[in-house]
Image: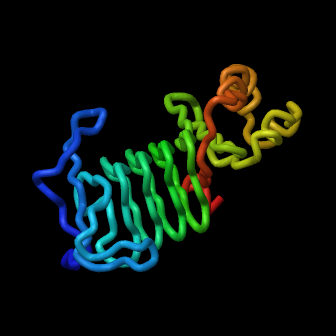
Amino acid sequence: MPNLKYELLADDTVKSWDGRTLFRIKALVAIAAFGVSAGDLGGYIEAEKNLQVSGNAWVSGNARVSDNAQVSGNAWVSGDAWVSGDAWVSGNARVYGNAQVSGNARVYDNAQVSGDAWVSPVTITGLTWTVTIADQEMVIGCQHHEISAWLAFSDREIIAMDRQALKFWRAYKPVIEAICTDTGRPFAKVDAPAECAAQ
């Protein structure tokens, strides 16, 4: 689909923290949902893959979207917000202020991320099972539970998940619990891995 929604301005660029060139966008059409008129300047994106060329999605102010991150639907990224990595902002979601959304985070529906919030799930690899920690929940292998449930599980409940799980849990629980209770960092919503859906 040709991009009739916005253009990238080659003469108005900034560098991302990792040296990528981001281009300011300029609206080619009005986007009434956000009060954008044709000719208005928007925020910065690395490439068209970062901002859907159809729909109302928009990046404004000094907001920046880079890497493989995508803004789509009716989503709006504004202020000094950053969206990067493989993050998606979609639906009617809003990311603004100094908020940062990165990694594999998904911000969608009517979610709002603002202020100095940092949204990025923590993923620990290289263990027997991959561990992904989100704001209120955690996935270890194919087991997806609230963090409070994980921390309260008895040895019997852990063994019921897998015969090797108790050894794993005893070895790594202190580190995982420390990450989960780090109050200085909110985490994003996470889904169980796709390969677990059939189990």
Q: Look at 47% across and 60% down and name the residue there.
A: 89
Q: State which quarter of the image contains the C terminus.
A: bottom right
Residue 48 place in picture, x, y as percent? 24, 63
Q: Look at 30% across and 47% down and name the residue there.
A: 67
Residue 179 place in picture, x, y as percent? 65, 27
Q: With 84 as the anchor, is 12 left or right in this view?
A: left
Q: Look at 23% across and 65% down and name the residue there.
A: 26
User: Where is 188 relative to 59, above or below?
Assistant: above
Which picture quadrant has residue 16? Answer: top left
User: Where is 111 relative to 103, above or below?
Assistant: below
User: Where is 153 relative to 58, above or below?
Assistant: above
Q: Look at 48% across and 65% down and name the residue there.
A: 90
User: Where is 66 relative to 9, above or below?
Assistant: above
Q: With 70 as the anchor, is 3 left or right in this view?
A: left
Question: Between residues 30 and 191, which one lies in front from this camera angle?
Answer: 30
Residue 102 place in picture, x, y as percent? 45, 44
Residue 39 place in picture, x, y as percent? 23, 71
